[in-house]
Image (cartoon, rainbow, N blue to C red):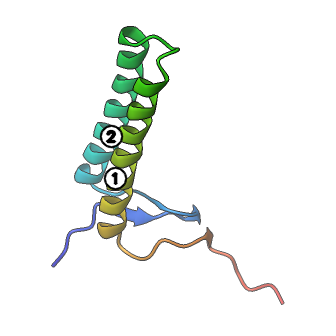
Amino acid sequence: MTRYWFKPRRYGYGAAPASWEGWAVALAVMAIVIGSIVGMEMLVDRSNFEAWMIWAVAVGVITFWFVRVARNRTDGEWRWRWGDRVNET
């Protein structure tokens, strides 16, 4: 039996953390991205285009990995949701 870390959002698209593992992964990714931004600002000159492009690719890879983990560990499919809408006819 698979234990789900995320649950589908009630409104919109995607998922939200539903267990401590989901929260841990989400917070770790946020800390890595924020830490990398701070580190880049402190260590790299803003005019160093090559370093910033490498950073952007790294953040893209981390984001891609996080979305894949979240989708695989979500209880249900990712689709657009409007909440608990009652059919209005």
Q: Residue furthest left?
A: 1
Hey, which quadrant is residue 53 in on the image? top left
**Position of residue 74 measured from the top left corner of the image (x, y, whole percent):** 35, 68
Mark with earlier residue (2, 1): 2
Reading the image, the residue beneath label 2 is 29
Label 2 neighbourhood size at 10 Å, few (<14), some (14-19), many (20+)? some
Q: Secondary structure at mark 2?
A: helix
Please identify the quadrant where the C terminus is shown. Answer: bottom right
**Would residue 81 be found to the left or right of residue 71 on screen?**
right
Tell me what residue is drawn at x 34 percent, y 52 percent. 66
Q: Residue furthest right?
A: 89
**Position of residue 22 measured from the top left corner of the image (x, y, whole percent):** 29, 53
> Which residue is nearer to you in this view: 39 or 28?
39
Q: Are marks 2 and 1 in contact (CB under 8 Å)?
A: yes
Q: Is residue 40 above or below residue 87?
A: above
Q: Amino acid at mark 1?
A: Phe
Q: Is residue 5 above or below residue 83?
A: above
**Position of residue 76 measured from the top left corner of the image (x, y, whole percent):** 40, 76
Q: Secondary structure at mark 1?
A: helix
**Would residue 4 be found to the left or right of residue 56 on screen?**
left
